[in-house]
Image (tube, grey):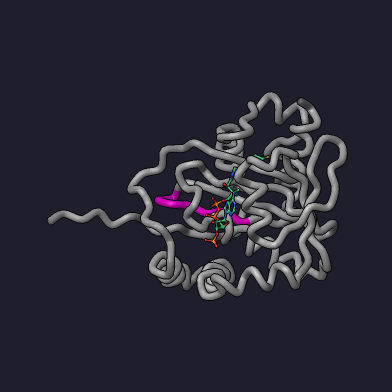
Amino acid sequence: MNSIVAPPAQYREITAADMPALFYVRTRTRENAYTLEQLHHLDITPESVAQKLASSFKGWLCAVADQVVAFCMANRSTGELWVIAVLPQYEGRGIGGQLMSLAEQWLWQSGCSRAWLTTDVDTTLRAYGFYRHRGWTDWKVEAGLRWMELFPAAAASNEGSNHASVRGVAQQVAQPHRRARGFLLAHIGGGAPFNSYVDMVSCVNGGEWGSALSASR
Ligand SMILES: CC(C)(COP(=O)(O)OP(=O)(O)OC[C@H]1O[C@@H](n2cnc3c(N)ncnc32)[C@H](O)[C@@H]1OP(=O)(O)O)[C@@H](O)C(=O)NCCC(=O)NCCS
């Protein structure tokens, strides 16, 4: 019997060289798709995002078969979870949760005592339930956006449910030379099977990108 071995999900930090892939993803979102022209109008360009990464921002991505399928970025100077995106066909596989965990843990390690984000006010969007599931709570609705916040205790409580998996991904990112082993462990440890190819359709959610875009509607 033939069996297809699906490629593992690979997690690593974002670099400036990843900008084209991130913008490819960003312009193919499922629930909030925007064009490159719209992003440019909002001063969200590969150059401006690379500049953020060179300052107080940090990001992580997930790749399958060397194709970026999701990413997340946060800002340690403000505590903002700036953006998270998962391709629709990769939703529900724990990828968004792993990326959020990396960002949240980095914010705590950077000295933040509180994290926050902005998202769409529409609570029927998957993102809202995802955030609530992770311990984020409503802060306010302002400027046409929903503002949410997270405190370390709530995040720690949430991480308890999949601690081993989160630890494995953190190890991949922290120790690149051990990535292959980490990927395998993460995949065996609960990842859903992956397709043998990547059909790029994407979804970006929340944060400054989402804020600016929502405000421009
Ligand atoms: C929100 C998003 C980042 C989640 O990513 P994901 O990879 O699908 O999430 P995960 O598979 O990691 O789910 C993590 C957990 O959240 C839970 N979850 C996800 N969506 C949920 C929901 N709507 N309600 C309750 N729980 C939810 C999952 O069950 C999972 O729980 P578990 O870890 O206990 O099993 C992703 O769906 C996405 O990018 N959505 C589009 C973004 C969007 O809505 N943009 C528009 C607003 S700007």
x and y percentages locating residue 181 in the rendered image: 42, 72
Task: Judge left or right: residue 159 versus residue 199.
Answer: right
Q: In front: 167, or 88?
A: 88
**Residue that sits furthest to the front in the current view:** 124
Q: In front: 2, or 174?
A: 2
x and y percentages locating residue 175 in the rendered image: 54, 72
x and y percentages locating residue 198 in the rendered image: 41, 42
Quadrant housing residue 9: bottom left
Q: In this view, does 60 lie above or below 207?
A: below
Q: Can residue 106 be seen in this view?
A: yes
Q: Is the magenta stretch mostly helix, strand or loop?
A: strand
The tally of labels here is 0
Q: Is residue 15 visible?
A: no
Residue at 52%, 54% in the rendered image: 62
Q: Is residue 170 above or below residue 198?
A: below
Quadrant housing residue 32: top right
x and y percentages locating residue 182 in the rendered image: 46, 70
Task: Judge left or right: residue 215 versus residue 168.
Answer: right
Q: In this view, does 98 lie above or below 22?
A: below
Q: In which quarter of the image is the N terminus?
A: bottom left
Q: Give the range drawn in magenta.
A: 60-66
Residue at 59%, 32% in the rendered image: 27
Residue at 76%, 25% in the rendered image: 217
Q: In front: 130, or 3?
A: 130
Residue at 64%, 68% in the rendered image: 158
Task: Judge left or right: residue 59 versus residue 191.
Answer: right
Residue 48 colored magenta?
no
